[in-house]
Image (tube, rainbow, N blue to C red):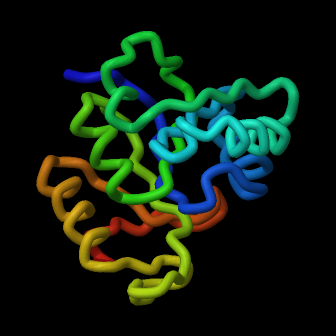
Amino acid sequence: MGTPIRFLRIDDRLVHGQVIVGWLPHLGTQSIIVANDRVAGDPMRQEMMRLAVPSDVEIDFRTPAALGSDQALPHDSLVLVASPKDAWACLQGGLAPEILNVGGLHARPGKAEIFEALHLDDEDRRHFQSIIAAGHRPVFQPTPQNEPIPLEEIL
């Protein structure tokens, strides 16, 4: 079945204000796991993210591929990934989120605007198509106050 987790969020900013003041209280969790190869290997970026979260919030850093095999993950953790590629790696590794949330994927060279604050290139689209084909139903919802929109309707 994989490792059950409540909430996986794709957001290229990873830890930022919307996550801290919006999603953490909305989800009622005090645990963040950042799953990103670059961050997992960069102690300086990890420290910057640690400084951004309140002292009562636990934050941990993993690679996406290794995350799904960790049966000790707190179910209520907010898992943050930076891209559809990272999300797909988590899912292939065995992570089983109840909710797969798509937040901001912002403008970058080679990415086209699909929806407000949602910019994708061909690789992103392929990963989202794989995620959907595997039976997951990602929803675009930048903040808890926004209505979730099934990503299939946007793509």
Question: To which quarter of the image does residue 5 belong?
Answer: top left
28 sits left or right of 132 in the view: right
The residue depicted at 60 percent of the width and 67 percent of the height is 146
**Residue lying at the far left of the rendered structure:** 133
Rendering coords of residue 3 (x, y %): 33, 22
Which image quadrant: the C terminus? bottom left
Looking at the image, residue 15 lies above or below residue 5: below
The residue depicted at 47 percent of the width and 63 percent of the height is 148
Rendering coords of residue 63 (x, y %): 43, 35
Rendering coords of residue 150 (x, y %): 34, 66
Which image quadrant: the N terminus? top left
87 sits left or right of 125 in the view: right
The residue depicted at 47 percent of the width and 55 percent of the height is 10
Circle count: 0
The residue depicted at 45 percent of the width and 43 percent of the height is 37
60 sits left or right of 109 in the view: right
Looking at the image, residue 34 lies above or below residue 123: above
Q: Nearer the viewer, residue 148 or 24?
A: 24
Question: To which quarter of the image does residue 2 belong?
Answer: top left
Rendering coords of residue 137 (x, y %): 28, 54
Q: Nearer the viewer, residue 10 or 66?
A: 66
